Image (tube, rainbow, N blue to C red):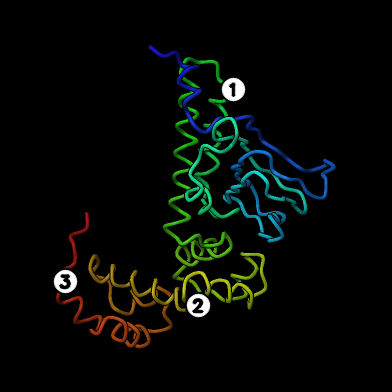
Amino acid sequence: METESALEEKMYPHIAIIRLYNSRGKVRPPFRIAGYFEIGVYLEDSGTLTVDGKSYPLHAGDVRFIRPGMKISSSQDFSCYSCYFSFGSQNTDYDPHIVGAIPPLLHYGPQAVEEIRNIMELFYSTEPGSKLKMNALLLKMLSDVYTLSVGKTAIPAAVRLCIDYLEENYGEHITLETLGKLSGYVPLHILRLFRESTGQTPHEYLCSYRLLQAKKLLCTTYDSINDIALACGFHSASHFQKLFQKRFGITPNRFRKTTAPLELW
């Protein structure tokens, strides 16, 4: 029967070090060349990450994924968890089609902090089986990051941040200036980046999302058309009804009559 250490040799990736890093007060070189694979989770909205000449504004919940040989630099102070690891002894035992699909930075969300903390606790644990659990958690996180990248067509972190904001605040008045401040880009730049990434402008995306939420409310509540329109961020019931019919080919009232609202408990 194989020992845990023997099994670990067959497990990929192999973590070299994992730590919580705070750059405040530290002297950093202008850039560095990555010697390991890296996955990092940022804890605050601060600074900019530059990878191979391309810059990314940093936000809490962003995940950094770096491959060996990449040139990295950062501006301003920041705090992040950083995990350095390899695939096999020569960093070659991995599928380049998988890791190559993961962008240097993407928005993962607040759960990323908890996940990498769990990995770090297991890294420093002496409990039997802890290293196997650690490798399993890191592999799961890498798999989730890959799925996020592919499933969302590797949407840039700034655009993903805007999408999350639109979906969480769709009932409010949201301007392009608001998204610009949120993403760290000037309004026209985030407009172009958003359109290139999603095929829609932020306004078009928001309008579509509002209509879908309104459709759900028509199916699941007895709220008036006017209340639903206002709750979903539309200026008026008439404006909402016009957009709804244009999108779905049926008026909200007629749609509601064809779908009995669910009982609420």
The residue carrying mark 2 is 201
User: Answer yes or no: do the residues labelled 3 and 2 have beta carbons within 8 Å?
Assistant: no
User: Answer yes or no: do the residues labelled 2 and 1 have beta carbons within 8 Å?
Assistant: no
Residue at the image point whose x is 46% and y is 75% from the top: 199
Mark 2 is surrounded, within 10 Å at the Cα level, by few (under 14), some (14 to 19) or many (20 or more) other residues, namely some
- Cα separation, mark 3 vs mark 2, equals 31 Å
- Whole-percent x, y for residue 34 in the image: 69, 43
Looking at the image, residue 216 sits to the left or right of residue 23; the answer is left
- Whole-percent x, y for residue 259 in the image: 16, 71
Residue at the image point whose x is 49% and y is 44% from the top: 111
The residue carrying mark 1 is 124
Q: In which quarter of the image is residue 243?
A: bottom left
Residue type indicated by callout 2 = Thr
Residue at the image point whose x is 73% and y is 40% from the top: 22
Residue at the image point whose x is 46% and y is 26% from the top: 133
Q: Is mark 3 on a helix, strand or loop?
A: loop
Residue type indicated by callout 1 = Tyr
Q: In which quarter of the image is residue 177?
A: bottom right
- Cα separation, mark 3 vs mark 1, equals 55 Å
The residue carrying mark 3 is 259
Q: Is mark 2 on a helix, strand or loop?
A: loop
Q: Which of marks 3 and 2 is nearer the N terminus?
A: 2
- Name the image quarter holding the N terminus: top left
Q: Which of 123 and 252 is in front in this view?
A: 123
- Cα separation, mark 2 vs mark 1, equals 46 Å
- In the image, which is nearer the foreground, mark 3 or mark 2? 2
Q: Earlier in the sequence, mark 2 or mark 1?
A: 1
Residue type indicated by callout 3 = Thr
Q: Earlier in the sequence, mark 3 or mark 1?
A: 1
- Whole-percent x, y for residue 112 in the image: 52, 44
